[in-house]
Amino acid sequence: MTDANPSAWARPWRAAWDRPLLLLTTTALIWAGHALVSRLAVGEIGPMTLTFGRWAVALGPILFAARKSLRADFAVLRGHWLYVGAMGTLGFTAFNALFYVAASFTGAINLSIIQGAIPAFVLLAARFGFGDTVMGLQALGALAAMLGVTTIAAQGEWSRLAGLAFNVGDLMVLIACLLYAGYTLGLRERPRVSPLALLAGMAIAALVSSAPLFVWEVAAGRFIWPTGDGLLLLLYAALGPAFSAQLFYMRGVELIGPGRAGLFVNLVPAFGALMAVGLLGEPFAPYHVIALALVIGGVAAAQRAPRQRVVERRDLSAEKAE
């Protein structure tokens, strides 16, 4: 097969590979489906088994896809092994471990909506942690997104705020998202290597750092032999969010740039909420509608603010490693 004369079966894939709208919408769907996987996995496979297993399965395809990049960038990655290890541990292992445990205590709708506020967390952290300039519309958007997350945590009952009577699962997702915001800001200091090589390095770090969690789950007597459904969910987590979505998103960024591509992250909470209602039958309460509107509207408003050089760097926040 050559580029000049691709086989019939390859043509649709090549055409799709050049369509950023299709690639990025699919990416958002895959990420949204991850919230459903987290809920469906409860009782089917242990959370630490799922965390470790997804990288054990995904690492092969990732290394294959990155083989050329790794040969070119291996020396640079080796020189930044501490950075790569920390980023893989924080953004991949810690985020997903908390996310999967939280799924035992909260619903897929909440998982999706709170996760959608990550860009706003990044904006706030960049302002207060690094002194970045934040435009007025960005600040307003971040505030709206935070109100949306608070609405979820309070479940529409503001008296919960006074008593701190939050769902522990919602709090765990919130902590996971804050950790991911830290990971995102860390991408500013990424070594000058290809995205695929960096993904491969961090995936290796995630596999290594998640292994002790898996061992602990077994030693603590909390290991669950994966059911057939559990194995299918593991396969989705590995080949969907951990592998395919990464490739699709990288290609989307290549085609239209990080700023425009980052806007598609706003689709994740919307898709996730709709899928949770339609596929899991979760109740969609009025406070979910309010929270969803606040999060999506807030993040969209922040993204529409006038761009400055320092603000443009934050577009790395959309490089989501679910």
Image: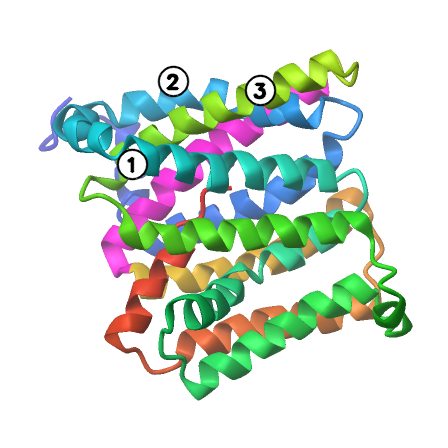
Q: CA distance from mark 3 to mark 2?
A: 20 Å
Is there any visible trace of residue 149 in the rendered image?
yes
The image position of residue 186, as x and y in percent, is 37, 51
Residue type marked 2: Gly
Q: Which residue is mark 2?
A: 60
* Quadrant position of residue 245: top left
The earlier-in-sequence mark between 3 and 2 is 2
Secondary structure under tag 3 reads helix
Residue range highlighted in magenta: 228-257
Q: CA distance from mark 2 to mark 1?
A: 15 Å
In terms of secondary structure, what is the magenta stretch mainly?
Answer: helix
Q: Which residue is mark 1?
A: 198
Q: Residues within 10 Å of mark 2 (few under 14, many from 20)?
A: some
Determine the residue positioned at 43% across, 72% down: 127
Is residue 178 found inside the magenta-colored segment of the image?
A: no
Residue type marked 3: Pro
The residue closer to the viewer here, 21 or 291, is 291
